[in-house]
Image (tube, rainbow, N blue to C red):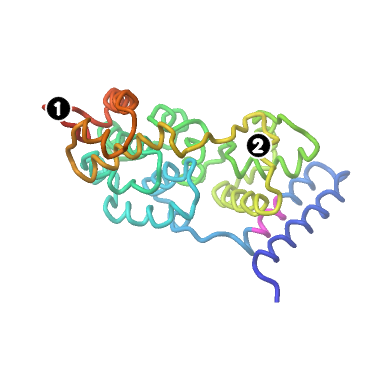
Amino acid sequence: MKTETQNKEQFIKSADLKFSSKKFISESKKVSLFQSIVYDYYQLFGRPFSWRNTTEPYKILVSEIMLQQTQTKRVESKFENFISYFPDIFSLARADLHSVLMLWQGLGYNRRGKYLHEIAKTVVENFDGNIPACERTLQSFPGIGAATAASICAFAFNMPTVFVETNVRTVFTHFFFKENKKIRDSEVLELVALFLDWKNPRKWYYALTDYGVGLKKIYRNINEKSAHYVRQSRFQGSDRQIRGAIIRIILDQKVVTEKKLVVLLNEDSERIKKIINQLIAENFICKKKGKLEIA
């Protein structure tokens, strides 16, 4: 009996043959064929995430910020826990940064948790707690770029936005740029717009995302063909790792001296001082009477 992984691989390889054999069909038939392949895969192998079972804009916002540069399996449990503590945007806006970052631990990139907190306060203060269904307005919020703004609009409001993220890029690169290198997102975006399901963009992007994940498990170097591909820098021993460790220690101990941080982290004092000053400048932490705490 075949495993689910084997079934996924068989589906994807069969779809490759089916699509390549129809290269001379009309554009409308190509759109229909491509959509049917992606939707058929989603019907069989779609992933059941809790944020897909809601259209509540606040929960979609939280999930999209959490999913930036973070694998879904790490987000799953964190999302549920975060929502149980902050069930709506008003409770998040009222919270202090210390509480937000405590719940964010384990997701990495603490800056995203801080941004989400700031977004919540802005939405409550300026939009009566209603997340705006406008890409341009969303992009004015900290930590939200073009792709995240478009994805929030698609998933929360079912708006037919056009965007590229890593899994969407994977699918279109695989099907349409097999022999190419240095593919620009502008080229991919043209195809994303052409093949978009305008009636149900929410479901379409979920399906595309899952197809992209399936492709990556079979063909591991697809996104390296992108002109925008950047190999992530080493985390171990990086300033990013030390930043996270400093915030984690302060969250745990509430207040700590710079001297104690140097001892606990066993790092060069000048390096620690530089990173502390960066965190203070970014309003992550503050210094009171010679001791550091969450701002």
Q: Is residue 70 left or right of residue 22?
A: left
Residue 142 x %, y %: 38, 30
Tell me if 188 is positioned left or right of 66 in this view: right
Residue plotted at (47% across, 35% down): 149
Percent coordinates x, y for residue 186 in the rendering: 66, 28
Quick one: 181 or 193, which is closer to the camera? 181
The quarter of the displayed image where residue 11 is located: bottom right
Label 2 crowd (10 A; few <14 / some 14-19 / many >=20): some
Q: In the figure, residue 276 lies in which quadrant?
A: top left
Where does the image place residue 240, in percent across and percent down from the top left?
Answer: 41, 34
Q: Which residue is mark 1?
A: 290
Residue at the image position 31 percent from the left and 28 percent from the top: 272
Residue pointed to by mark 2: 193
Quote the CA–CA distance across marks 1 and 2.
Answer: 55 Å
- Per the image, label 2 sits on a secondary structure element best described as helix
Magenta residues, as a range?
A: 35-41
Q: Identify the amino acid type marked 1.
A: Gly
